[in-house]
Image: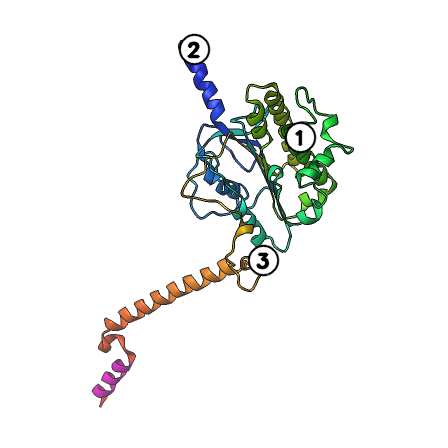
Amino acid sequence: LLISEVLLSIIAKQRLKNLTVLQAPEFVSFQKGDWPVSGEKIPDLVALTMGFSIQEDLSWPGLQAGPLFQRPRANVLVVVRGVDSLALPQSVASYPLENPVPFTLDSVAETVHSLFAEDTPVVLQLAPSEERLYMLGKANAVFEDLPVTLQQIRARLSQDGSVLASLPLNSLSRNAEADLLFLSEVQVLHDITALLQRHRHLAKDHSPDLYSLELSGLEELSRLYGQDSPQYRDATAILASVLQKFGEDVYALYGNSAVVEVVTVKTFEVPLTRKSRSILESKQISNPGSPYNLAYKYNFHYAVVFNIVLWLMIALALAVIAVSYNLWNMDPGYDSIIYRMTNQKIRMD
């Protein structure tokens, strides 16, 4: 009985581990442990791994502070809906996920765009099932041939270089809608790595790249066939191996300087008091001079000018206080040269 309870607890912990770090460079230090991380804090975690500052401190021991002058060249976050955990063969660390609410990396994308606007970094946010695509910078030129709509992706499956020729489909069908949705997402992962291999110069620039992918094919298979079905089991095994290879390929393309995370969640908990939306849906324009809802350009001299003005004002204030104090406590007969010379002249007369 005791052994069975221990096994059940181990299985429960394994099922709770929903944030998996597939690849990370040595200077991004992830500590192994069972520290839970909230779903709404994942954008802050991604920002910290890229060396950006966040509004609120993230008191989470899973990520330690790294060197100031080293940052990864890319961060790739893959969200898999419809499964608690994947049997990934190799990973850096894995953590439980608490409060799995929907989140986006819009804040991180805005930071990358504002700090590296002149270098035009790659920012790609893609959800094939929802036909949602957001590209910024060099991504517009690199991924212009990437199939976006479900019709385009399904047409891509029938072309040369399709994943159908190399994947062991087993119980999956090429004619079922749910199966095609899952295979389409696998095809998108394959096409992204193929395009990155064709444009290797992207990994050699100084601006960090950001990729955010959301896959929901397993969720449709679970809803249609059930989690105990052979289709769902085969799809889970295929996705685990594909994600492992995808992480290794991206990590190698960026010269072992990329962070690849996988978030697995069966269903997102939609809170009643919070509604997330994309930055593309915002109606308020933060910069009235720009019709594209772009933020003001960040000036790299802002921090320097701010510190100069701040400490100069403090120094002048201290100087005024010191001079005022000395003048108030000054003895004119001994501390003033004017009165001293006057007294000597009176005595001589």
**Number of the label disc, if any, that sits on residue 3:** 2
Left/right placement of residue 311 relative to residue 46 reads left
308 lies above or below 85: below
- The residue lying toward the viewer, choosing from 175 and 92, is 175
Is residue 25 something one can see in this rendering?
Answer: no
Residue 91 coordinates in the image, percent (x, y): 57, 28
* Number of marks: 3
Residue 226 location, quadrant: top right
277 lies above or below 63: below
Residue 122 coordinates in the image, percent (x, y): 64, 47
Q: Which residues are magenta?
A: 338-347
Residue labelled with disc 3: 292
Say few, some or many: other residues with alpha carbon within 10 Å of mark 1 (under 14 / 14 to 19 / 20 or more).
some
User: Do the CB atoms of the residues marked 3 and 2 lie less than 8 Å apart?
Assistant: no
Q: Secondary structure at mark 1?
A: helix
Report the magenta stretch's main SS. helix
Residue labelled with disc 1: 180
228 lies above or below 102: above
Left/right placement of residue 139 relative to residue 31 reads right
- Magenta stretch encompasses residue 19: no
Work out which residue is located at the far bottom of the displayed protein and give it.
349
